Image: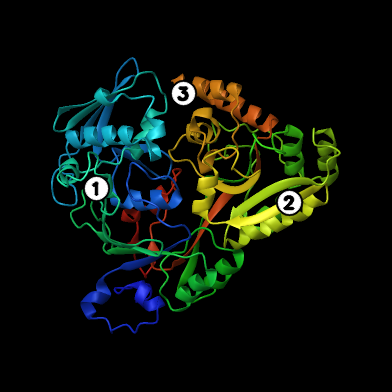
Amino acid sequence: MRGLLPLTLAAALAGTSLMPLSASAQEKVSLVVNTVQIFGTIDPAKINDYTEYMGAVNLYDGLTTVDGKGNVVPQLAESWEVSDDNLTYTFYLKKDATFQDGSPVEAKDVVYTMQRLLAINEGPSYLFNDLIDPEAVKAIDDRTVQITLNRVYAPFISNTPLILVVNSDLVTAQGEDEWGESYLADHSAGAGAYMLDSWTRGAQMVMKRYSDYHGGWPQAKPIDELRFVVTRDEATVKALATKGELGMSSQYQANETYDAISKMDGYKIISAETATNFYLKLNNQIAPTDDVHIRRAIALATDYETIRNEIYPGGELKGPLAPVFADAHLNALPAPRYDLEAAKAEVAKSKYAGQEPIPLSFVYVAKTAFEEEIGLLMKANLESIGFSVDLRPEPWNRITELASKAETTPAVTEVFYGPTYPSPDAVFYVQYHSEAKGTWSSMAWTMNPEIDMLIDKSRTQTDPAERNATYKDIQQKLNDMQSDVFLLTQRKRFAANECLQGYTWVPMQSWDTDFSRYWWDCEN
């Protein structure tokens, strides 16, 4: 059967001959999934980017999860209540949920998970660390946990899928350090659908299906094994498909790769509109992009139609928020336009006028063909209006290092960002609030008190209409200051084996690659 690989892909890629499969082995569904970024960590308290979230959502379950419509729905918590003052949240855990060692998921595990997240202060902790005191997370009984906020935070429930619950007994039994950081750097200890089997850092990660998963396996042929293969080499991806070994590609292939694989026997292209946006992140704190006229010039020198129709197909993006957030989206924003004469006029208005050619650093993710193509197009356009563009590729892990300080963040960086939880707050706070500075998602370094105030205001508004009105004010302000260049909304595409079923786009980063929702069926 095409796409079923019971032996290591590493051996196959190295040219090692593979033994014939037994009949029983052929029944196991082993899915090869291509990723273009390395898994830096699988510790749920430290996950930070798309790939790390993809690993975590398969190894761990949260108090809640998200469906394809963006609704927060039960997962380890079967229900919850909110106090009249919107400060206390009480979660009731499922009776039959177990960790992958068979022990029950209990309230003490949620308490440990939250206190661990707050103490480590990495990854998703920025959502909680100034909102929840460690002692405000309490186990009322084995199946009831209570979390009390120190102030009203309207989107809190939308954050709870990121409370990925850790097996406290297993982790503390290791005795290595207080929060089990050494152990969870190389092991999983969750209640998720898959268990970590092996991990060759920078190359491959293998997960095995947990047969007693509390969420169940309703389909006849669930995915038994996940083999995540890290490569940016599109020739390798096409070679895997040619041999029938590719289960699912990454979402970051060039058009030519999608076209080539779509013509191969047994393959299809999965496509979905998303809430993920593709930006040119403009560093508002360093020269020359600290000048709004320079930022506007770069935006006007961007050939949006060519980029989103020919280089990387996607939808129109008028501002920082994707239109799938319909109630919160500011439809009145004008569409961005490509106008080199207007761009020249903006350069002339800037404090850098007369200093042409103006040096401009421009970074894209190394070995990503479409990003290189966009970079070359931008370089040509920008140099025609008075810039000297230093265009350079950088590995993703290097980009995240550069993003930690304003002075090391490039003036322009190509970045995809998708909401890490299903709320516009994930778009605004994570990218633009001053407290969220220093990450790859906040490379604009807006550091604007008015933006901070509006975001803070939206987080206290429990009335959805009032909150959406504030979201629209934020969009207008960010558009006026040209915080970024808004290239497009991502039309997510995967090249996949035609037998792979169950893909549903979810408006939360990587939650659409929760493979417990997929199955294998070659008849449909």
Question: Which of labels 1 and 3 is toward the front?
Answer: 1
Depth order, front residue of 294/224: 294
Foreground mark, 2 or 1? Answer: 2
The three-letter code of the residue at mark 2 reads: Val
Instruction: Please identify the quadrant where the C terminus is shown.
Output: bottom left
Measured as percent of width and height from the top left, residue 326 is found at 55, 35
Q: Residues within 10 Å of mark 2 (few under 14, many from 20)?
A: many
Give left or right: position of 269 versus 516. Answer: right
* Foreground disc of the pair 2, 3: 2
Question: Judging from the image, what secondary structure is the residue with disc 3 in?
Answer: helix
The disc, 2 or 3, on the residue closer to the chain's N-terminal end is 2
Q: Is residue 300 above or below residue 108?
A: below
The N terminus appears in which quarter of the rendering? bottom left
**Amino acid type, residue under disc 3 in the picture:** Arg
| Depicted 14 relative to depicted 288: above or below | below
Q: CA distance from mark 1 to mark 3?
A: 30 Å
Question: Taking the image as drawn, is residue 280 in sight?
Answer: yes
Q: Position of residue 121 (x, y in %)?
A: 36, 35
Residue that appears at 43% across and 42% down: 69
Mark 1 — residue? 190
Q: Label 1, secondary structure: give it.
A: loop
Q: CA distance from mark 2 to mark 3?
A: 39 Å
Residue tagged 3: 459
Q: Which one is nearer the viewer's eye here, 115 or 513?
A: 115
Please tell me how crowded label 3 is: few (under 14), some (14-19), or many (20+) other residues with Cα within 10 Å. some
Residue designated by label 2: 389
Query: Do the residues under discs 2 and 1 have CB atoms within 8 angstroms?
Result: no
Q: Is residue 272 visible?
A: no
